[in-house]
Structures are given as C-alpha cells and as structure tokens.
Amino acid sequence: MSNCYRNLRLGILAVLSLLVLGAGPLHAEAPPAQNDAVWEDVAGQKVAWQEGPRFRVMAFLGCECPVARLYGVRLQELADAIDRSPASKGSVQWVGVISNSHDSAEDIRAFAKDLGIQFPIIKDADQSIAKAWQATRTAEVVVVDRQGLIHYRGRIDDQYAPGVKRSKSLHSELNDALVALLEGREPSVTVTEPTGCLITWETDPSSDNPITFAKDVAPVLYRHCAECHRSGEIGPFDITDFNEVRGWAEMILEVIDSGRMPPWHADPNHGSFKNTRSMKHEEIELVRTWVRAGAPMGRIEDAPTPPAIASGWRLERDPDLIVDMRKTPYSIPATGTVEYQYFVVDPKLTEDRWVSAAQVIPGDAAVVHHAIVFIRPPDDVDFQGIGWLTAYVPGQMATRFPEGYARRLPAGSKLVFQMHYTPNGRETQDLSKIGMTFVDEKKVTHEVFTLAGLDQDFEIPPGVSDHRVEGRLNRLPTNGELLAVSPHMHLRGKSFELRSRDTSGETVLLRVPRYDFNWQHTYEFSDRIPLGKFDGLDFTVSFDNSTGNPFNPDPEEYVMWGDQTWEEMAVAFFEVARPRTVQESARSSDTNSSTASQSSEPSAKAVAYADEFIRSMDRDGDGKVSREEATSVVRDFSFPRLDRDQDRYITREELIQAVDERRGR
C-alpha cells in the first residue's frame, strides 16, 4: 500500500474512532503477536511483560521532535508519580518506541540520557512495531492490558503540539486514563487525536520520478531552511543531512502546507519586504511531488554545496563593541514556560556612538526563541524614540542600516536584553550577547529611532474569538521615513493590520492575518516609505480569547493590558529615520532659543497627541500621568525624557513641548 493511501486510511480510522469510541470504552485489541512480543531495547536488555504490571504504556517517540522531547520528560514524571504511590507501584510498565529511520541507537541512548528517561526504549528498525500499533506521530501513546485490550490511544495531554506551547495543560488524558484504570474504572475518554511529529514511513522511492533531493529539493531547502535547521540551531534537524531530511519528509510537507514554515506571516498582497521568507507555490509543489515519490536522493554529483552559513558575527566587519547580557549564564529548565526575562547591562560608554549595524548572538540557539535589546539612556539626555536597538529571531538577519543611516547610542546608556526562552526537554544555560559596529558621526545623514503606537485602554471579554483594538500614531517626524514595523501582542494575538492615513483615505501597508506570538517578526519594507504626506499611521489588532485558540491561557478570563504573557498588549514598534539636519536645527533651537517654542503657538498635532496620551493613561483623572499610571513601554523608555521637571508626573504642557521640539518647531 502506498504511503499516501496508508495515511489516508489511518486518518479515516482515527476520525471514526473519535466519533464512535472517544467518549466510551475502547473495544480494540492489541495487534496479533505484539502484546506478547519480546523485544530488545537500545541497552541490550529484553523487554517483555514483567511480573506485576497490569497495564503497559506504549510511547512512540522521536529523538529530535520538539514535542516528543518535551513529552519524554513528562512520561518519566508520570511513571515516577505512579511508582511513588504504594497503591499503584509496579502496576504500569512503560515502553518507548522510536521508529524514525534516522534515529540511531546511539541517538536514542543520548536522547534518554538528556531527558532522564529510565524506562526501556526500543529501536523499531523496520518500523514494524509502529505499523502494527498504527501509530502515526511521535508522542503518541497506547495503553494496553495483559490480555491485549487497548484502553486508551492518542495524545498525552493538550499542552504541547507542533507550533503550540500552552503554559499548562487543560486536559491530561493519559494521566486520567491511568488513574481510572488503576481504580478499576474505564477511562471516560479513550481516544484522542495524537500530537507530535509525523512518522515518515520507509518506502522504495519511485524510480521514474524526475524530482530528486540532490538536483531539485536541496536548493529549495537550503535557500529557505538552512538558517535554522542545522546543527546547533533551533530547528530540530540538519537540513544538510539527507538521511535526516528523508526521515522528516512527511513533517516537512505538513509544516509547509500549514503555513508554519518558513515562519513568515505577512499577507503578500500588501507591501513588499526585503526580509520575506515565503516559499513560492512552485517550490511547495516540487517538495510535495518529491515526498509523495518516496523522497529519492538522486545522483550525489547533482547535489549543491551546502550553504556556508557563518555561526558567528554576520556584520560587514568585526564588531566594534561586544556586550554580554549578564556576567553569568541564565539557566533554562527542561520543560515548562519561562516568562520573559530582562537583563540590564552597562556597556560603559563615555561618549555618544552611532550604530550602523547590530546583531544578537544567542548563547544557546536551541532555546532562545527571540531577543530584543533596548537602549536605556541617562535620564537627562534628549533622546529620540523608545530605545529599540536590535532584535534576534531565528532566521532573521542582523540589523544593517543603509549608508548614512545610524542609531544614536548616548554616552552613559545601559542596554536592556528582553529574552524569550522555549525549553526543549533538557536543562541548559544561555549567555547571549550583542555586537555593534559604529560609524563616524560626520558620516551620519539620517538618525534611526523607534516609535511606539499603543492602546492600553481595552478589555477582552471571555470567549470572544475576534476582539478588535485600534491604535494610532499621529506624531510623525518631519521629513521622516518608515523603515520597518514590529507588531507585538501576547498569546491571544490573532491578526494585525497597519494603514497609512491622508486626505485621500487609507492604504494598507502591512497585513498579518495570522499573528504568531512565537515569532516576533520585524517587517522591513523593501523601499523606505516617506512619512511627510501622511497625517498618521493607524493599526488594528485582533485578539482571540476563545477555546479555539490553542495558546489561550484561560478563555474564561477578562483580559486587560499587562506585561505578563497571560495578559495582553496592543503595540506596534515603528523603525523610522529622519535627516539629521532637521534634528540638529531643533536641538539648536532648544539650546539657543529656549523660549522660542514656548512663545509660539503649539501645533495641532502636538495638542492632539498630548490629549490622547493623557486620556489613555490618566486613570485617576488629575490631568497628568504618574509613573505608576504609565504603560511599561513609556515607563521604561520614555518617561525620563517626557517628565522634564523630574517631578514623576508627565503633564499636558510637557507633552506638547516635547512633540513640537522633535518636529523642529
């Protein structure tokens, strides 16, 4: 039977099982000769029914599958918990099975050691065990008794799946099934849809298929995937190793078809971006044809040379300054959710520097999902924007500005590392760092800085699947250019749209129909967009607080603005540039004619901005914004500059003055 038809048959059986058997007893028997089989694990020990166990958990795993690695730890925890109870000790036997052709016995032993797995693991070399039990994914489990009756089949719980990491599980079907069985009851849920990475079945490649890995597929995968899918990076396999690629062929096709890979979420119908990662339709179809033909290798001499991707700095030259995020590494646990971590470091700058390029290198790329570095200038320094310096996202290139463009790093500034970690099944440590190249100030024609548009005055009702919040950036710099935009929401973020506004109406600049919190993209426009003709930039974010959102921490909660991931944010960061001549004129006016801006009439835009700022943040209605009332973005990066008299309050007059000075009035 072909791989395609077999998967279809198994899919139909799974659906029928869910419909017919999911809520009641699972009247199915173990495959003939499998339940009483005697296997040998990778340690050379015999695996058979022992004296004592009433039930056996068959756990299908994979050495590199992120979901299987997380659940490998979970399975051992469950096994230990059962054996700690005198009433259930020795009642359950645990057997791991790895059927991936590319996972060697040595890989499996290392996998078990890394995750602390004590139960035996079998190398299913011919995939006969997985086929007999009709397993389709790693992290799929089957619970069977000594008589061969299957009592549960499916996922372990609902915390993890490809592309999904909840902060905690809402349903723990395997644990619930074992508790029921050990108490002499049938589980209330006996079948669930398995989660994890697809098992690719070994088949003889089609001899008449013209599409091969060497000639056709390798160039596509090298172009789109090698940045992350190689040794030591966050991707779970090495794209330059054909045996690994073939073993992951079905999963590669699934993540491409679902839009999860390559990670890119901009609608191609709106805007052009120089850092886009999208695959063309013909490239996807080429990969599909290759997978369906059995993933043939082709002639080795046709294979391209694997891309030589530098593992270190990817700047135009060695960095002029390298700063570690802290003095000692930060420890990341094997499992669970790690909230955003913030590290503040002093680079000890004694003079202003102008940053022409910057890059963050993660200490352990396998667990650093993204990092953002902010500039925190001294309180008494006049500074543009909120202080964004650069960001790291797997597969995203280092920040490089056009010639003549640079970001100011004032003397005495500190750097704030915002780190997002994703545990991968093993305890590890990270010590990320940033490298920067500087340019002579005399060569800087445009200063680059970051503005933030936000709305924190919202409340998302429980259960709603499309709650929309509007944001606006009215204060656009004179002669400014828009270089890039970075949307930011948390786990309930669903979509984002950015529009320019002028007298003729609105134009969509960026649309992100499927926002993904796990990928904090910066969308870099192919061409710099002049801001002078716009009256403002508007954006709409949508939140999904329903049960249909697999990331949702709690669909029954009202959700408001907050820093934690179970709260929400509606923010857009805008990378803009402005000719230095305009800025220098404004600063000169402030220094030499400090009364000029005070004696002139404030601009309408400054007044509108100040009124909106006060309206959105002044919670006690006293007409000014205290440090406690300000959002975390304003508090951390803008408050010292807006609070001109340093009395811990931002007044309407201070806001108007700050806006007009930056506009060169």
Image (tube, grey):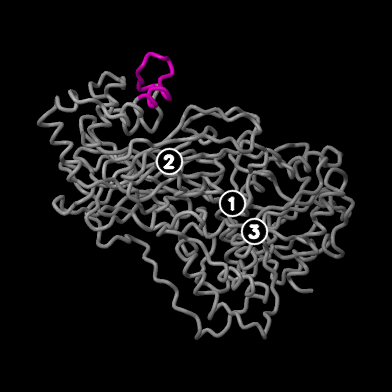
Please, what secondary structure does the residue beneath circle 2 have?
strand
Q: Measure the C-alpha gap from mark 2 to mark 3.
A: 34 Å
- Residue occupying the point 90% across, 51% down: 27
Q: Who comes first in sequence, dot 2 or dot 3?
A: 3
**Residue topped by disc 2:** 572
Q: Which residues are magenta?
A: 611-628
- Residue occupying the point 16% across, 54% down: 443
Q: Who comes first in sequence, dot 1 or dot 2?
A: 1
**Residue topped by disc 3:** 197
> Is disc 2 surrounded by few (<14), some (14 to 19) or many (20+) residues within 10 Å?
many
Please, what secondary structure does the residue beneath circle 1 have?
loop
- Residue occupying the point 29% across, 60% down: 315
**Residue topped by disc 1:** 163
Please, what secondary structure does the residue beneath circle 3 have?
loop
Instruction: Identify the amino acid type marked 1.
Output: Gly
Q: Is residue 635 left or right of residue 40?
A: left
Seen from the viewer's position, the closer of residues 507 and 259 is: 507
Q: Quadrant of residue 251?
A: bottom right
> Is disc 1 surrounded by few (<14), some (14 to 19) or many (20+) residues within 10 Å?
some
The reply to whether the magenta stretch includes residue 327 is no
Instruction: Identify the amino acid type marked 3.
Output: Cys
Would residue 53 be visible to someone looking at this image? no
Q: Measure the C-alpha gap from mark 1 to mark 2.
A: 23 Å
Q: Quadrant of the N terminus?
A: bottom right
Q: Quadrant of the C terminus?
A: top left
Instruction: Identify the amino acid type marked 2.
Output: Ala
Where residue 458 sits in the image (x, y, percent)? 52, 28
